[in-house]
Image: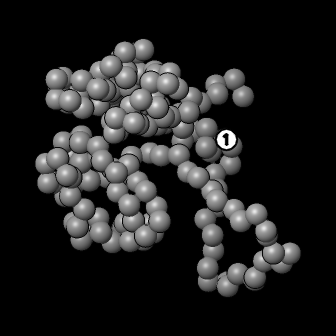
Amino acid sequence: MVVYNLVCKKKHKFEGWFPSFEDYQKQVDKKLISCPACGTTKVEKLPHACAVHVKKEQPDKLPAARPEQTSPVPPSPAEFKEMLLKVHHYVKLNFEDMGPRFAEEARQIHRGKAEERPIHGTATAAEGAELAEEGIPHVILPKPELDS
């Protein structure tokens, strides 16, 4: 099961659960995914962090992979850093900076008391946990290390 943070053309953010990436892609292609707020089927995935789950007991030998099946190669640290810099650049150009008022403004937008728009800023771990408990969608982006 994969969970994606999605956004519609009107910038409504919501979460989608899919059996696999392929199933997500099929549903997007057939316009079966719609925004719960406005109903549009023009949706896309937001950047997200990945989790890898490994069984504690690994077999000594892995089965031989079939030649026609190749696993995607994970990005190198330099490639990952470049992707992260591009995401931060995109956010800086397209999202309004709330600074340390991010959690407060996200609540106001979620409650309909402020104009809905893409925002970014900073929040403490406690503020992030409170937003999650309140069901307010948000994403934590790691900051790229610029000195390495």
Q: Position of residue 23 (x, y in %)?
A: 38, 71
Q: Is residue 61 above or below residue 34?
A: below
* x and y percentages locating residue 137 in the rendered image: 35, 39
**115, 69: nearer the viewer:** 115
Position of 98 compared to 43: left or right? right
Q: What color scheme is it? A: one colour
Residue 94 in picture, x, y percent from top left? 32, 30
Q: Which residue is mark 1?
A: 78
Q: Quadrant of the C terminus?
A: top right
Give the residue at x 69% y 62%: 54
Taking depth in this image into account, of 5 and 87 the one nearest to the observer is: 5
The residue sitting at the top extreme is 100
* Left or right of 25 on screen, residue 32: left
Q: Secondary structure at mark 1?
A: helix
Q: Would you say 148 lies left or right of 90 here? A: right
Name the amino acid, label 1. Ala
Taking the spot 41% from the left edge, 36% from the top edge, the residue there is: 132
Q: Which residue: 56% across, 33% down?
A: 142
Which residue is more in the foreground, 91 or 55?
Answer: 55
Q: Where does the image place residue 111, in percent across and percent down from the top left?
A: 20, 29
Could one spot residue 97 in this view of the protein? no
Q: Residues within 10 Å of mark 1 (few under 14, many from 20)?
A: few
